[in-house]
Image (spheres, grey):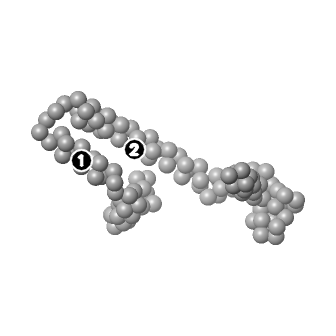
Amino acid sequence: MNLWVLFTFFLIGWIVVASFSTTPAIFSGTITSSGFHPGGNYLKALVNHKVGLYFLNSLLYTVIACTGALLIAAPAAYVLARYKFRFNKVIQAMFVAALSIPAVMLVIPLFGLATRLQLTNTRFF
């Protein structure tokens, strides 16, 4: 176990050091000597490759999705837990069945639908 932890920390440390190095330095094996440029790769990713914009888009969608899920799920959970009505157990079983579907099986068809509707590479997807 201890050996595995040390190995994992070594790999994470190597990734952090390599992220501050240039590409030629990584492939030549001189990561820690001449090819060390603090912040250069991160600045290039933020400015040239729009990672900051992608992060803000992800943050926007995450906040909207979590808020929407909370606004729908909290009242539904309250009603299903507190009140007894005719199809209460059926609805609860449907929620459990829906949770058993792997997320990948939902994401891939949804992405295909968004692509066919030409919603990719827009503000909405």
Q: Residues within 10 Å of mark 1 (few under 14, many from 20)?
A: few
As drawn, 68 above or below 12: above
Residue 34 is drawn in which quadrant?
bottom right
As drawn, 36 above or below 66: below
Residue 104 seen in render: yes
As drawn, 76 above or below 2: above
As drawn, 56 above or below 111: above
Kind of residue sitting beneath label 1? Ala
Q: Which mark is residue 53?
A: none
Measuring 53% from the left and 46% from the top, which residue is drawn there? 56
Measuring 19% from the left and 30% from the top, which residue is drawn there? 83
Nearest to the eye among marks 2 and 1: give it: 1
Q: Is residue 1 left or right of residue 88?
A: right
Residues 60 and 18: in front is 18
Q: Which residue is mark 1?
A: 93
Q: Residues within 10 Å of mark 2 (few under 14, many from 20)?
A: few
Q: Is residue 112 left or right of residue 8?
A: left
Residues 102 and 121: in front is 102
The quadrant of the picture occupied by the C terminus is bottom left
* Residue 72, position as x, y percentages in the image: 30, 38
Residue 40 seen in render: no
Report how far apart the C-alphas of labels 2 and 1 lie in the structure.
24 Å
The answer to whether the residues at label 2 and label 1 have Cβ atoms under 8 Å apart is no
Give the SS element for disc 1: helix
- Total numbered badges shown on the rendered structure: 2
Kind of residue sitting beneath label 2? Ala
Q: Which mark is residue 65?
A: 2
